[in-house]
Image: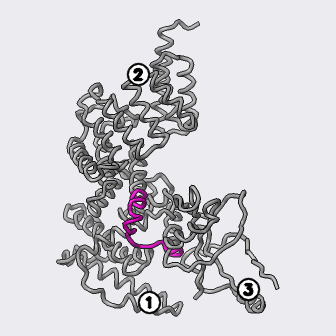
């Protein structure tokens, strides 16, 4: 069926993009995510079947909305005939009033907050966002998140049932709740990004996270958290092509080929950081501050040009709005660059609660190497490797340990 | 006379698609037979629809919600309210005002509306 010509590919893309938008509207019309999905799926198939023959209608979105609505009415009628519930079908049959264009924007925004509702587990929110907001099929979501399709299918069905049965609302939170809820949404998108970013083969998840961040930015262009999130993603993503070797090994920041960093992403990210800071002057948003730190790295022409004292200052700002052990760990690295390994070691020792976190041990190991505390360094590497690490991280830490052990063996004759 | 709560435990009943349309005939039969003593009662949706609400730091503190049923074994069931709310947000906000949520947890689970 699929013709390998660009016109057809463009048509498929149009149908899929419009399908995603129509879904948000259909959720409002039907009040039922599963029903809306089934109806839109039908409209997508019809468009793909009809448009190549008849040409794309002048208003493709309106065509698909109407087709999906008709399908939804059919589905509800069939169900109500079985159960005797007529009211729902009748409500759907009423023709929708002319809707202003900003209604679509609001529909998408409402759907974002439904999919990222805190009553859903974080990994479920991520899956639902990919499926519902990015339009990925169950199999595609499973691949992006490394979960078998059958498991993913069950998880998505459960999530949709919970939304329907527990009446997770389909609305934008009011002004009082918005900052909290927005951080929940940002956390979901960021988790999706890191999910893909940490793997050599994670491009889909990272791309979709960026797309969601752009969607949020289009929907809420004035929110500092949204500006900071998009900036942070762009700045981290600018390094994508240099972060892994062809063999899939992670390349540390200091060793990446900076000439290959994606300049347009860095420029866009830096502008967004500035805007985010202007919009949250008194109490900067944590995402904006993290993006500012990423910008310091991105703007250094060479690793040795990195302005570590600026980075340390940003970490101090970050601690005032987002004080967590992991932030303190990252700050300790900056302390090590500014004031030497001894000072950083003292910071790390104060974070012994991170004993179950492999990167705490790995960071200690690097500092112990610099302090020439050989036996302790070896132990710290081993402790990091005994804890759960991503495949790329594990190879990196194991590689660092091997290089260090070789170096020590070279200096001291083996007895 | 004394009021008693009869709490029903058993294997998870997940009827898969859609919602159960009618009460099982056994329950309908019991409800009829024991009508004289029944003051109320409801069936609950499966635990996958549950949300646990905790308030960190006591009254007025941060409301923390978690997906899924209450699974700790240290605490025991001390009581229940039946809440009629517009949506889950209102139910969560109300649950967070229950003193039990300040020291322990409140599980919010939707009640099945039989056709």
Tag 2–tag 3 contact (CB < 8 Å): no
Residues drawn in magenta: A163-185
Q: Position of residue A274 (x, y in %)?
A: 24, 47
Q: Which is more foreground, mark 1 or mark 3? A: 3
Residue under mark 2: which chain is it in? A
Q: Position of residue A39 (x, y in %)?
A: 38, 78
Q: Residue at x 56, y 18 (%)?
A: A375
Q: Position of residue A205 (x, y in %)?
A: 38, 52
Q: Position of residue A256 (x, y in %)?
A: 31, 31
Q: Residue at x 40, y 92 (%)?
A: A90
* Outermost residue toward the left in this view: A58
Task: Identify the secondary structure beneath mark 2.
Answer: loop
- Disc 1 and disc 3: Cα gap in Å? 30 Å
Task: Identify the secondary structure beneath mark 1.
Answer: helix
Label of residue B26 in the image: 3
Please check whether the numbered discs 2 and 3 fall on a single chain: no
Q: Is residue A349 left or right of residue B105?
A: left
Q: Residues within 10 Å of mark 3 (few under 14, many from 20)?
A: few
Front one among A372 and A200: A372
Q: Residue at x 60, y 86 (%)?
A: B114
Residue identifier under label 2: A340
* Outermost residue toward the right in this view: B1
* Residue A151 visible to the viewer: no
Residue identifier under label 1: A77
Find out whether residue A179 is within the magenta segment: yes
């Amino acid at each position: 069926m699929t013709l390998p010509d660009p016109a057809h590919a463009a048509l498929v893309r149009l149908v899929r993009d419009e399908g995603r938008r129509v879904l948000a509207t259909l959720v409002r019309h039907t009040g039922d995510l599963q029903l809306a999905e089934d109806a839109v799926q039908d409209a997508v198939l019809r468009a793909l079947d009809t448009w190549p023959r008849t040409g794309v209608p002048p208003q493709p979105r309106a065509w698909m909305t109407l087709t999906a609505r008709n399908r939804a009415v059919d589905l509800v009628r069939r169900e109500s005939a079985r159960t005797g519930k007529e009211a729902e079908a009748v409500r759907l049959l009423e023709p929708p009033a002319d809707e202003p264009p900003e209604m679509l924007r609001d529909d998408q925004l409402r759907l974002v907050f439904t999919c990222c509702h805190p009553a859903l587990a974080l990994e479920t929110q991520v899956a639902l966002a990919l499926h519902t907001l990015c339009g990925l099929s169950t199999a595609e979501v499973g691949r992006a998140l490394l979960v078998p399709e059958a498991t993913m299918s069950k998880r998505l069905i459960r999530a949709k049932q919970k939304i329907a049965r527990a009446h997770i609302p389909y609305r934008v939170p009011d002004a009082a709740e918005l900052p909290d809820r927005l951080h929940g949404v940002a956390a979901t998108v960021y988790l999706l990004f890191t999910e893909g970013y940490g793997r050599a083969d994670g491009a889909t998840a990272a791309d979709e996270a960026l797309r969601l961040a752009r969607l949020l930015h289009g929907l809420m262009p004035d929110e500092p958290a949204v500006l900071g999130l998009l900036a942070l993603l762009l700045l981290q993503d600018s390094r994508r092509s240099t972060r892994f070797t062809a063999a899939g090994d992670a390349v540390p920041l200091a060793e990446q080929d900076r000439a290959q960093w994606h300049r347009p992403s860095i420029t866009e990210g830096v502008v967004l950081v500035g805007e985010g800071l202007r919009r949250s002057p008194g109490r900067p948003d944590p995402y904006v501050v993290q993006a500012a730190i990423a910008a310091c790295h991105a703007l250094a022409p060479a690793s040795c040009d990195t302005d570590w004292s600026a980075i340390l200052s940003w970490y101090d700002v970050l601690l005032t709005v987002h004080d967590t052990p992991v932030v303190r760990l990252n700050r300790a690295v900056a302390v090590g660059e500014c004031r030497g390994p001894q000072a950083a070691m003292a910071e790390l020792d104060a974070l012994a609660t991170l004993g179950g976190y492999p990167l705490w041990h790995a960071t200690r190991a690097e500092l112990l190497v610099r302090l020439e505390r050989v036996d302790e360094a070896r132990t710290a590497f081993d402790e990091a490797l005994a804890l759960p690490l991503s495949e790329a991280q594990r190879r990196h830490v194991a590689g660092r340990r091997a290089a260090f052990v070789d170096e020590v063996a070279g200096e001291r004759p083996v007895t | 006379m004394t009021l008693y709560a009869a709490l029903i435990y058993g294997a998870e009943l997940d009827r898969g698609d859609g919602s159960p349309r009618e009460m099982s005939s056994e329950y309908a039969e019991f409800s009829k037979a024991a009508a004289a003593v029944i003051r109320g009662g409801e069936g609950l949706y499966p635990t996958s629809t549950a949300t646990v609400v905790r308030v960190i730091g006591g009254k007025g503190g941060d409301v923390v919600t978690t997906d899924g049923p209450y699974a700790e074994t240290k605490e025991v069931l001390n009581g229940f309210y039946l809440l009629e709310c517009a949506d889950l947000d209102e139910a969560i906000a109300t649950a967070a005002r229950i003193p039990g949520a300040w020291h322990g947890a409140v599980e919010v689970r939707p009640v099945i509306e039989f056709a």
